[in-house]
Amino acid sequence: MTNPLFDLSGRVALVTGGGRGLGFGMAKALAQAGATVVINDLDAARVEGAMRTLAEAGLAAETAFFDLTDPAAVAAGVREVESRVGPIHILLNNAGIQRRHPFVEFPEEDWQAVIDLNLTAPFRVAKEVAKGMIARRAGKIINVASINAIVTRPTIPAYTASKGGIMLLTKSMAVEWAQHNIQANAIAPGYYDTEMTKALVENREFSEWVTGRVPAHRWGRPEDLGGTVVFLASDASNFVNGQLIVVDGGLTCSM
Ligand SMILES: NC(=O)c1ccc[n+]([C@@H]2O[C@H](COP(=O)([O-])OP(=O)(O)OC[C@H]3O[C@@H](n4cnc5c(N)ncnc54)[C@H](O)[C@@H]3O)[C@@H](O)[C@H]2O)c1
């Protein structure tokens, strides 16, 4: 029998950028715990693939196509999801991008694109979704940060700044909305094998560095985040607020 603490039956979860990768993996875990998952993305083919995989596993889901970088689209998208599917109880701010350039050559437009999707979009979506959560006095917000919120490597200054920012944005949400029975926490994945990291996975030297450096000696897989996201979305974490939970196979605790 499932522990009721982790039961998400009857709860609507909006997952941004859930068409593939870590977002899709976490959406599947939320659906397996009973949530009605709404997969937001921009890419229709990705979302169709995601829906097919969920259907094959006997899991139902809804879709919501809106661009997270467009404030008007986000406000309208959140309203549309709440009227079509139901009040959003769980928000998983997952969508993100990476851009790599040497610091002194980093183009302003790439800096802006990374900050806009990785940091401003979670602020924007949470602002819209929290209005309903505050009125209903219930909500779980989970922001996807990265180990780059706490440690970094060369060529990713915008990504690092965005992920450090989201860690503290999470704390801002937690302290302001705890009084309304909303918990906001962040997950910090280490190195995971997804489309975003394809170039790194396929780079033999880098991949060997990861598997040598990570105490678990492997890349993470999207399903490795399932337990953490269900915990943070469920009643099991009702007194956990403003935290960053690192899921990195031990990478950041080893020298
Ligand atoms: N892969 C890793 O190793 C890793 C490690 C740490 C953190 N993360 C973080 O996890 C999250 C997911 O990463 P991933 O590896 O699954 O990436 P991914 O590129 O595989 O998936 C991101 C999804 O977001 C969607 N998206 C992009 N822009 C959008 C927009 N404007 N509106 C709506 N959807 C949009 C894309 O279509 C895509 O389906 C990101 O925030 C990333 O920074 C990833």
Image: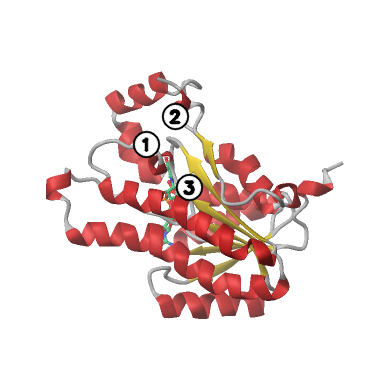
Q: Which secondary structure lies at badge 2? A: helix
Q: Is residue 52 visible?
A: yes
Q: Residue at x 83, y 43 (%)?
A: 2
Q: Residue at x 16, y 56 (%)?
A: 107
Q: Which mark is residue 21?
A: 3
Query: Where residue 232 appears, x then y in whole percent?
Result: 65, 49
Give the side of residue 91 with respect to residue 100, left or right. Answer: right
Q: Is residue 18 visible?
A: no
Q: Which secondary structure lies at badge 3? A: helix
Q: Residue furthest right?
A: 1
**38 to 197, vertically: above or below:** below
The reply to whether dot 1 and dot 2 touch (C-beta < 8 Å) is: yes
Give the side of residue 176 with respect to residue 154, left or right. Answer: right
The reply to whether dot 3 and dot 1 touch (C-beta < 8 Å) is: no
Q: Amino acid at mark 2?
A: Thr
Query: Where residue 197 appears, x then y in whole percent?
Result: 36, 41
Residue identifier under label 2: 252
Q: Earlier in the sequence, mark 1 or mark 2?
A: 1
Q: Residue at x 87, y 41 (%)?
A: 1
Residue identifier under label 1: 151
Give the side of residue 105 with respect to residue 190, left or right. Answer: left
Q: Which secondary structure lies at badge 1? A: loop
Q: How would you rate the neighbour count of disc 1 (Cα within 10 Å): few for under 14, some for 14-19, many for 20 or more? A: few
Q: Amino acid at mark 1?
A: Val
